[in-house]
């Protein structure tokens, strides 16, 4: 497939080639130039490092590189990785998408198909999205990392795919706000090598079954979906190899008392947000010896802090960071909480509260007194307290080793 590009340079193609040759760049081996092109393409300021997808465009990226000279064009055309990452969000020319797919050859494919907004449901947009998804569907065997925001037609098309053939798929970020969301989520379990999963949607996840799918995941991020406290415990028990788990909404529900105790040897980051009840009961069934980052967001109840402290004591982990967001935190709660030796040993502690909850100046004064009455409580560590006001500017206090001076 031929696709001719134009350049804003006043030099003709032959003049550019002569200029490039005279610069000495052509003396570099093809392999080195190819590597330089890859670094330049994927470290471009227009590329978000969290989502390394490239918008098919003539003004930058591999198509621009291939317009510089015949030599550069030849190198770009024989470097499939340059064309293997595609971001379809607005309305790029579908001929460019096809060109990228052709020139990426058999290289594993990374792509993002995301409508401009969730309300962008015009007939033109839907037809374009369907056409783009149809192109990517033909390359299912090459999928490695995908980011999809599925709407009605694309969700149906996704469910029709033989996902067991996606043998290279390692990372998936999927959003589906439809009633078919449960089916889409369940369909992902057919992917044989999926390791990193981000799920966004308003529907609850399906019941966790005894399957190798959960045990193969090393990173799970459940956004905007409700997980009951019982499902949360069951999910953790079936994810022994997960190193990072984030659950944005743990809701109330029945919790059995006879769950066996489970040690999660690989869990390093645990981010959990709950409702107005004590979801910290989840911690009672687990030990997490590798945990180095724990983030808890909820409205407090009586046993929460003791459950967190028991988890840390039981796990014997060396937390490097602990974050607590609790809009019912009181001055006494903070002082009591930070008397715990495990909490005092954490290098970085962050807690977010509201001005209704406490007087920060009084709290810091009390913590200073606690430090001097109990010896070097915080040592070289740092307490970061964020004062979250209702409609007020955010004021940050940093308590450091120089004697709890706030800045």
Image (cartoon, rainbow, N blue to C red):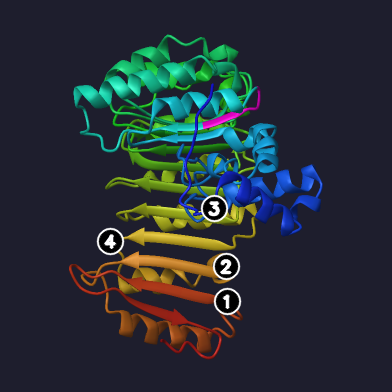
Residue 108 lies in magenta, yes or no?
yes
Q: CA distance from mark 1 to mark 3?
A: 59 Å
Label 2: which residue? 346
State the predominant SS element of the stretch in magenta. loop
Callout 2 secondary element: loop
Quadrant of the drawing holding the N terminus:
top right
Label 1: which residue? 381
Dot in front, 1 or 3:
3
Q: CA distance from mark 3 to mark 4?
A: 63 Å
Q: Position of residue 363 (x, y in %)?
A: 35, 80
Label 4: which residue? 327
- Residues tagged 1 and 3 counted as in contact (Cβ below 8 A): no
Q: CA distance from mark 4 to mark 2?
A: 22 Å
Image position of 8 (left or right of 15): left
Give neighbour class at mark 1: few <14, some 14-19, many 20+ (Cα, 10 Å). some
Label 3: which residue? 11
Q: Earlier in the sequence, mark 3 or mark 2?
A: 3
Q: CA distance from mark 3 to mark 2?
A: 60 Å
The span picked out in magenta is 106-110
């Amino acid at each position: 497939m031929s696709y001719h590009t134009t350049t804003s340079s006043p030099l003709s193609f032959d003049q550019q080639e002569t200029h490039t040759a005279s610069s000495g760049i052509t003396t570099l081996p093809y392999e080195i130039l190819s590597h330089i092109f890859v670094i330049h393409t994927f470290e471009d300021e227009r590329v978000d490092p969290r989502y390394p997808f490239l918008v098919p465009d003539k003004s930058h990226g591999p198509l621009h590189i291939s317009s510089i000279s015949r030599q550069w064009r030849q190198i770009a055309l024989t470097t499939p990785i340059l064309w293997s990452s595609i971001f379809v969000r607005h309305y790029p020319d579908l001929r460019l998408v096809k060109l990228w797919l052709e020139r990426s050859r058999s290289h594993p494919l990374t792509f993002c198909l995301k409508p401009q907004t969730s309300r962008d449901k015009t007939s033109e947009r839907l037809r374009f999205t369907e056409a783009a998804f149809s192109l990517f569907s033909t390359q299912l065997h090459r999928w490695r990392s995908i980011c999809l925001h599925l709407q009605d037609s694309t969700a149906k098309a996704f469910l029709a795919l033989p996902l067991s053939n996606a043998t290279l798929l390692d990372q998936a970020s999927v959003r589906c706000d439809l009633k078919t969301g449960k089916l889409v989520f369940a369909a992902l379990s057919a992917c044989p090598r999926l390791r990193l999963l981000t799920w966004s949607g308003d529907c609850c996840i399906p019941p966790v079954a005894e399957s190798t799918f959960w045990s193969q995941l090393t990173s799970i991020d459940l956004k905007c979906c409700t997980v009951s406290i019982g499902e949360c415990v069951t999910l953790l028990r079936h994810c022994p190899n997960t190193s990072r788990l984030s659950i944005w909404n743990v809701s109330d529900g029945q919790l059995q008392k006879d769950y066996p105790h489970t040690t999660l040897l690989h869990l390093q980051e645990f981010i959990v947000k709950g409702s107005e009840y004590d979801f910290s009961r989840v911690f009672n069934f687990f030990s997490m010896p590798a945990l180095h980052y724990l983030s808890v967001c909820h409205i407090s109840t009586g046993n929460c802090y003791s459950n967190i402290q028991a988890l840390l004591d039981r796990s014997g982990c060396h937390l490097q960071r602990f974050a607590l967001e609790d809009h019912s935190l009181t001055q006494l709660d903070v002082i009591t909480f930070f008397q715990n030796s495990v909490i005092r040993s954490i290098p970085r502690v962050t807690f977010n509260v509201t001005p209704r909850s406490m007087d920060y100046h009084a709290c810091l004064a009390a913590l200073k007194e606690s430090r001097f009455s109990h010896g070097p409580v915080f040592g070289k560590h740092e307490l970061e307290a964020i004062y979250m006001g209702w409609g007020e500017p955010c004021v940050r206090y940093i308590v450091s080793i120089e004697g709890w001076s706030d800045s």
